Image: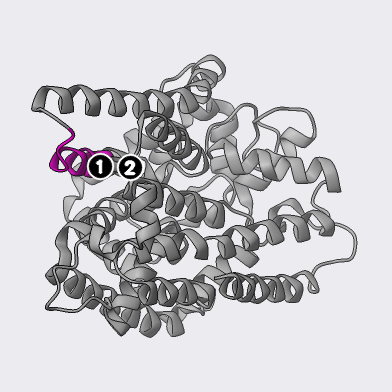
Amino acid sequence: MMAVFFLALALRLVLVGVLISQLPSHTIQSNDFGWESWEVGWIARSIYLGHGFSSPFLPLTGPTALVPPLYTYLLAGAFKLLGLNTVKAAIAVLSFNSLCSALTCIPLYFLTRNALTERAGRIAALAWAVYPFAIYFSASRVWDYALTSLLFTCCLLAAQKLHLRGVWAWVGFGVLYGFAVMSNPSIASLLPFLMLFAVVKFWRQGHGPAGQRTLKISARSLAAVAAFVLVCTPWTIRNERVLHSSFFMRDGFWLEFYAGNNGDTHESNSAWAHPASNPIEMAKYRSEGEIGYMAEKRNLATAYVETHPGFFVVATARRIVRFWTGYWSFSPHYLKYEPFDLPNVPFCLFLLWATVRGLIRWWRQDWRSVAPYVVALLLFPIPYYLTHSSMDYRQPIEPLIIVLVSIGLFGTGVGRNRPGTEAERLPQSDLSAA
């Protein structure tokens, strides 16, 4: 596995080196730092300047909750150590992203090996190491993609054997999932289902009379939930005190919903709808404040959808297609600004075919093991179906997709005439530890 890890890291660092060589030798503009850091970069700049978690756009505009805090504070730390928007900071941050993406090979290997075979685990890890999207988004974007993918894959690995562990392991799972959500809240909807799968496994294993099992599983579940809430609550309290509004983790949903549902058929995410790209919107944002601005966007978007339901249905269908195939439009005007969509579409169609094939293969052999993957593929994209979608938004669940792609191409490695239960596939050392 170390060879696969070093291969993954080398491929990503090579791309970092190529991209860094194209930067100016001293500093770069905030809106270009790390090639589209945008809100994360501007807020990190504000923290660096001593204004706190604020100003998600180029002007200094006050407190914000447009993005989650974990990665943003890490970026601000890089600025503190290496300078604001410097090339040194860019190298450090993109190298950190590359390290996180390369490290994802390791939990991905164990996740697949535990459910299937050693061979399947190695294939999945190697596929992630050379996966073009994982390489590109980790080595070229200052965003949480790589960190979230690593944390969420670790959460899946922990949940896989959670039913075999004691109460402190459930606490650790809750803490880990809390930090993953602090990196990207889009995975929060999957927590109840991962917990449910662990509860069902625990119940099916026995663990004494029904009453005793109920007490044990209740204690473990409450411990995990309490740990998760403990990690996330301080940020929620901060938002209530600073922004005087209650919401979970970030407050930008209605801006994104408006950007995708305003009658614009040319773009999945209308650039003119964002304050960062439109001086008129920026003036509104500054005068109304973030909470008031989001409330206005909610009213505008819901009113448009109510009066144009057909547009919403068609746009949602197009976003679903774009999420899985990369296709939005082949018009010359669109491709002028999104030239990489043209080669991406056949590659994404290949990935979709292999993913579906892998799901079918695995489901026929062991539907219980593949059930969490099905839930993730069904639930995770829903917010993006409603707002706007692109390939980078898939990154938190891309490791799961790669597992299914590798199964679709190379099979599960489990003999069809064997029961193929998870316990039978675990190495003896793992069974002893459990």
Which residue carries the number 1 mark? Answer: 198
On screen, 311 above or below 197?
below
Secondary structure beneath label 2: helix
Q: Nearer the viewer, residue 199 or 305?
A: 199
Q: Which residues are magenta?
A: 195-207
How many marks the image carries: the answer is: 2
Say if the magenta span includes residue 200: yes
**Residue 55 left/right relative to 325:** right
Q: Amino acid at mark 1?
A: Ala
Secondary structure beneath label 1: helix
Label located before the other in sequence (1 or 2): 2
Mark 2 burial class by Cα count in 10 Å: few <14, some 14-19, many 20+: many
On screen, 201 above or below 172?
below
Instruction: Identify the image quadrant of residue 311.
Output: bottom left
Return the residue found at the far left. Answer: 210
Q: Do the residues bearing badges 1 and 2 touch, measured as CB atoms within 8 Å?
A: yes
